[in-house]
Image (tube, rainbow, N blue to C red):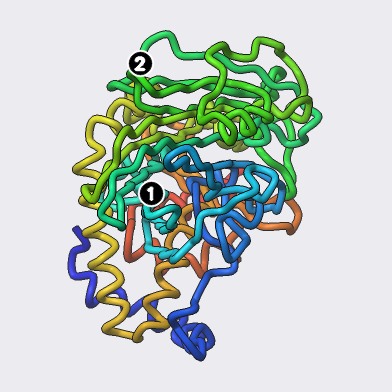
Amino acid sequence: MLETISRRVVLLALLIAVTAQVAVAADLGTFRPPAVPLVTVDPYTSVWSFSDQLHQSWPVHWTGAPHAMAGMIRVDGKTYRFMGPQNVCPAAARQTSVTVAPTSTRYVFIADGVELTVTFTTPILPSDLSLLASPVTYLTYSVKALDGKSHDVTLYFDASGEWVVNDAKQRIVWQRLAKPIAGMQFMTMGSAEQPILAKSGDNRRIDWGHLHIGAPAGTGNRLGVLPHDVRGDFVNSGEIPAADDTAMPRPANEDWPVIASVLDLGTVSNKPVERLMILAYDDIFSIEYMHQKLRPWWAKEFRGFQDMICHCIKNYADIARQCEAFDAELLADARQIGGAAYERLIAISYRHTWASGKIVVSPDGAEPWFFHKECFSNGCMATVDVSYPAAPFFALFSPTLLNGMAAPVFDYAATD
């Protein structure tokens, strides 16, 4: 999996050993990253929690603009929020922990004798380039009773149209995929205009392509697009309307349309009941390089976006095991080298580094190229001052993409 990682991880240790010492807190048990990664694929599909508790504020894009997600759990007729601020639901489940690993972030909540574990996993496995480049995040739920009783449990999730526009005044559209993919129903959402790579800059969100959200098909589960006040419907009744909102195109901030899902878990006892959702983004074209639009690397590896999603769903169990094993091995090596503080520094920096750029197909269609995106500078990408300090990371995890960082720089330098 990570060939001779114990020897080569020293590269990272030498680079940031001093920083690791700064990360030491008086009580490591209270550690929480200032930005907790949730859905971290690339500079556009990049959603974080800036709060101590997941239910204290809206998740945001790395630029700070809200990319709202709301989450609620209903236990025996009482509803509690676990994600999003108080206006989602007045009552909040009690968050007992948050754990950040290289490929996943896990939150644990308690409400009315029930424990809910919410896990965001982006399968950034360097040994599998096709998976590494796939713009998919798994959202998994695990619910069990802690009090020896049985409870009726229903879950709610939604994501807003802010995910698909740079400005909430832009108009959005949505649709339901005609057929399930590997047993999951999907809704998609995107901007009405679709200005693909039309603008550049730093403080920008994606306003082209389509967000895909998948939930299990079947009786008791619901997925659709509805105004944001559907959250109140779930708080009061545990249900949401059956019919989709059809008033489109319309601005993302006009009644704030959301892709909403309800999952009926039935009766839950001390045996965990699990559910899986999929969050994925099809950006169509990722980079414009020398007046040529470049496709994302996954488009070369799969027959299409739905084929890629199907692969990720069908292989979820194996991919989840690989992610867990990768996380455990990498963190064990980091802990052996630099202790608990260094282990946590590696845990929080791994997805930061991957999500800083995008893997695309080179102009000749032959190689994977990796473009870093700068943060609030002058709109640049693939700059050497960013690539240079990242080089040891890519030398360790993906020499192929280290070459993919250098190639466009040399290619550009060879032009007139």
Instruction: Give the position of the N terminus as an image quadrant.
Output: bottom left
> In this orientation, which residue lies closer to the viewer: 41 or 162?
162
Mark 2: which amino acid?
Answer: Pro
Image-based side of 172 in relation to 117, left or right: right
Please report the residue visible at 43 percent of the width from the left and 53 percent of the height from the top: 112
Picture residue at 60% right of the left edge, 17% below the top = 174
Tell me which amino acid carries mark 1: Thr
Q: Which residue is mark 1?
A: 121
Q: Position of residue 109 (x, y in %)?
A: 44, 57
- Calculate the distance from the C-alpha at mark 1 to the C-alpha at mark 2: 22 Å
Which residue occupies 64% across, 33% down? 232
Among the 4 quarters of the image, the one containing residue 243:
top right
Whether residue 240 sits left or right of residue 111 in the image: it is: right
Quadrant of residue 277 within the rendered picture: top left
Closer to the N terminus: mark 1 or mark 2?
A: 1
Q: Could you tell me which residue is drawn at 77 percent across and 24 percent down?
A: 251
